[in-house]
Image: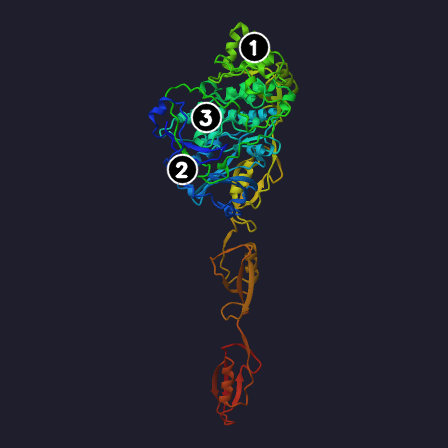
Amino acid sequence: MRIETDDTGHSRSTPQDSHSVNMSSKSTDNAAQANPQVSPPAPQQTELGQIPSENQSAPDNDQMLKRLIDGRYRIVKVIDTGGMASVYRAHDERLGRDVALKIMHPHLANTTSLVDRFEAEARSAARLMHPEIVQIFDQGIWRRRPYLVMEFVNGSNLRQVLTREGTLPLGRALEITAQVLAALQAAHSMQIIHRDIKPENILLTPNGQVKVADFGLAHAVNQATGNTTGSVMGTVNYLAPELISQTSSDARCDVYSAGIMLYELISGIAPFQSDTAIRTAWRHVSEDVPALSDLLPWIPSEVDDLIAALTARNVSERPADASLALELVQAVSSCLSPQLKERKAKRPQNPSPESETEHTPLGKGGTAVLPVFHLAEPEIPAAPTRPSSPSSNWETDSSVQPVQPTSRPAKSSGNHNPAQAITKAKANGKGAEKVSSTEQPRRSKGKKRWIWALVISLLLVSSGATAGWYFTFGPGGTVTVPNIQDKTATQAESLLTKAQLKVKTVREYSDTVSQDKAIRTNPKAGSKARKNSLVTLYISRGIEYVKVPELVGKDQEQAVALLKEAKLKLAEKVEEYSDEVEKGRIISTDPAAGTSLRHDSPVKLTVSKGKEPIKLPDLAGKNEAEAAKILADLKVQMEKSTEYSDSVARGKVIAQEPAAESTVYHGDKVKVRISLGPEMVTVPNVSSLSMSEAKQKLESLGFQVKIRKELLGISPNRVYSQSPSGGTKLKSGSTVTLTYV
């Protein structure tokens, strides 16, 4: 087999590295295909396709801080940087909550295939609503860079926990694996597989709840799983053999990755580690996962056989999906003593490092283009002999002496079943501690059997009578989950307990089931469950009531979102003019804010149309009082001024500004000119003045002068009389008659 890899850095690694790789089918050496057990040669040159070069590094995260994305998401802090994208803590300023914002690196945004895969993450994960799966809120494009808006989990990922603690107690490792499988069960039930299960993608809340993240490699099972180009993405430390050798995937790929992760949680190291990504991937194809008890003699055979079942190289020998794998984990966990569950391995000297792809740009332990290991035969090849002492880099539990390879019995030749040790221990009540490693039968290196399939064979042979009893009538048998409908919480718990089931009670709101009555169980009533396995009992809290949020002053989009978040519906939306509330914002709600309503109740929103436009009437000729009332009724202010007018009677409106038919709004000012009537001028006494002097004086005051002559012969050219007389008030422009002799 000819294996090619990029020597520019895309497949370089350090020992025990967790590589993220792109397995791509290239031409392979015919001789190598004929002998699939041939070790891969040294890495050589290969094409990179559309994978960016090493010098295209991730963006400077500091430059993104405090930026507002799409006018809504304010970046607060850098959470992580991977080969494809960076993840930030951001604040949704529209809904007032913290979110996780994942933005693709700018140098990748022009690669169509990567953008499509990035956007597929949102479509896949958005379909999943499960408490142990990180929820997708939004998707968009900012400056040509796709982004996802996700639920913000204020905690650590599992890699960080391992880095801090080294290893986990056996019981805690099984519990976390069970939660991961429960999340995957929800995904598998919707025909979605994750394809990248690893500690970096498992988040833990402060109270220890698991949140499975990053469905970036997920796809629907009903889509074509084969790849004509032979290309598949994943992290090599956790890739299932069939993904590497055939680029095919189904739910069992996730089961395999979960089994590898369980191994690492207990031991602190991944089972397969090599100096290159290719060699690491090859070991998944060509080797069985080694028994944990080879490193930790105190590990019971039940755990060895559980990991063997989850990580079987032959895909047909694995649990078909996460649901069945979860049953196995719960069954094994239930048979272990509390003391054994609390036991943990010491920190290994060379633990598995955090995946470089989570913190470095592509090209340094990042995404590589590698060939698919096409097998000459459909059977998985037998494993090559692994080193006699895998514990060279291992610090064992000081309470148990390491078992030398020479003291361990020879492995079975191929007819041993992985369930035998579990069954024996359970039947004999030996689940607490391993008495002697030499008494523990080990699974075959050559071929693993899925536990449940082997249980059937155990039931068919007389030598397996004890095992048969255990898995039928004994504690390992199955029972039917009883129907708890219409039962009280106490009654339902009693029925489940009598059915030899453990009960976890969860309370949730229900519109149809009365408060404190049972709603359903998981697994559902009538299904089969292992004795002493955990059944979730859902008890009604009654109808959920919520309060109408404060929406006054919010814009319409924000108000509708807040109603939805409060589990209320928009009844109707009416628009009204408002002098106080800006156009497009909420004036009021019906019912008012703070009112307690049944969830899904309708709420009426009144939205502002802004200030009401007003057409000014014609005020000309109106008296002052009439004009003032008209404007007051229109909620418009009157600004009055006065002036003389010869044409408009005193107290009447001469003119207005703005003019009639103009548009104004409440509170605006309208200038109104009120007539003082004609202007009056006092007629001066011009008697005894010369005619020319008198005429000039009167005309200067705006009067018209009319002259009349009398033949009396007295004082010629002097004003003899005037009409009207001096002191009389006349309109400007009136006529004054002068008489002279």
- The kind of residue tagged 2 is Asp
- SS at mark 2 in the image: loop
What is the quadrant of residue 408 in the picture? Answer: top right
Give the CA distance from mark 2 to mark 3: 21 Å
The N terminus: image quadrant: top left
Do the CB atoms of the residues marked 3 and 1 lie less than 8 Å apart?
Answer: no
Under tag 1, what secondary structure? Answer: helix
Q: Where does residue 495 sit, x and y in percent of width and height?
A: 63, 15
Q: Residue furthest front?
A: 406
* 350, 345: nearer the viewer: 350
Are there few (<14), some (14-19), or many (20+) residues within 10 Å of tag 2? some
Q: Is residue 616 above or below residue 549?
A: below
Question: Which residue is painted at 61% across and 14% down in the image?
Answer: 499
- Which residue is disc 1 drawn over? 467
Label 3 – label 1 distance at C-alpha:
34 Å
Q: Residues within 10 Å of mark 3 (few under 14, many from 20)?
A: many
| Amino acid of disc 3 | Arg
Residue occupied by mark 2: 7
- Residue under numbered circle 3: 283
Seen in the image, is 545 located left or right of residue 380? right
Q: Which residue occupies the foreground of this view, 147 or 702?
A: 147
The color scheme shown is rainbow
Chain-order first, disc 3 or disc 1: 3
The answer to whether one can see residue 309 in this image is: yes
Instruction: Please state the horizontal and vertical placement of residue 651, each as a whole percent of the image.
Output: 55, 66
Q: How many numbered tags mark residues here?
A: 3
x, y (%) of residue 290? 51, 22
**Dot 3: what SS?**
helix
Depth check, front residue: 279 or 453: 279
